[in-house]
Amino acid sequence: MDGSPDLGGFADVDGAAEPGALAGYLDTVRGVGAVAEWKERSFALLDPRPGAELLDLGCGTGDDLLALAPRVAPGGRVVGVDASAAMVAEARRRTAGHPGVEVHRGDGHRLDLPDGSLDGARAERVLLHVPDPAVVVAEMVRVLRPGGRLVVAEPDWGTLVIDAPDAAASRAVAAAGAGRFRSPFAGRTLRRLLIAAGLTDVEVAARALVIHDPDAAEAVFQLADAADRAVGAGSLTPAEATAWRDGVARAGAAGTLLVAMTAFMASGRRP
């Protein structure tokens, strides 16, 4: 992965200092077994079938489009939409030559797609980066045909827990980590958002991503950056942040470290 990304940069990838690092972060997280299983669950909830037309909002590097395309073949298509020109370019590069895949640049608050034109839509780790998650959900519902399915998966950064020496410092780091996002608590709101958008048969599942390895925890949650932000916010002193990082390293070496976060997945059907 090129550099250590600022996770808040996903709100404006093209304005980020290192867009390539954000793409690399997506690749790193995709390699986490629990994340891969969670993705598979979201694909299955879309009920993809030959001939179906699906939307992947916030498609990023396009790898999920490649996973979905064979499930709607023959005759189907998957449409990826992302707000970032850099991500769209990378997704087009990765999906080039694959039939039934389209990638477009667009704003989830104002999708350039006709009403009732798709059989299913999904978004994963998108709503936490947008100013108005309710508007984005309503737009995804708008483009669904009657009976079409919506699947949305979001972490809830308010549920980040770090079992390391100095519990108070861990709480400060977790709070600073959540502060990187526009809508850090989007995960807990999914049921309400889907019901408010008029969907029926709304179901919600939750699971905790639990990591014991300090390097993996750093790669996924960017804890060092969160500690720096806690210092910047005045909730930790530089010495306290250094001591906290040392404690995390000791816990990791001793095999006692635990870092976990709850993710939510909601699905529903347009009447």
Image (spheres, rainbow, N blue to C red):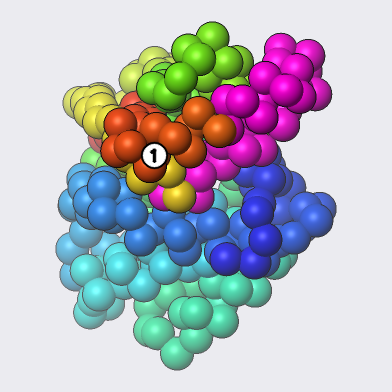
- Image quarter in which the N terminus is found: bottom right
- Location of residue 204 in the rendering, given as x and y in whole percent from the top left corner: 25, 25
Q: Is residue 187 above or below residue 90?
A: above
Q: Quadrant of residue 149?
A: top left
- Residue drawn at x 18%, y 63% is 49
Q: Is residue 140 above or below residue 80?
A: above
Amino acid at circle 1: Gly
**In the rendered image, which residue does mark 1 sit on?**
252
> Does residue 148 appear anywhere in the picture?
no
Q: Is residue 223 magenta?
A: yes
Q: Which residues are magenta?
A: 216-245
- Residue drawn at x 42%, y 49% is 216
- Image quarter in which the C terminus is found: top left
Q: Is residue 81 magenta?
A: no
Magenta residues: mostly which secondary structure? helix
- Location of residue 249 in the rendering, given as x and y in whole percent from the top left corner: 48, 38
- Residue drawn at x 66%, y 30% is 242
Q: Quadrant of residue 196?
A: top left
Q: Quadrant of residue 22?
A: bottom right
- Residue drawn at x 33%, y 37% is 254
- Location of residue 200 in the rendering, given as x and y in whole percent from the top left corner: 25, 25
> Does residue 121 appear anywhere in the picture?
yes
- Is 209 displayed left or right of 88 in the figure? left
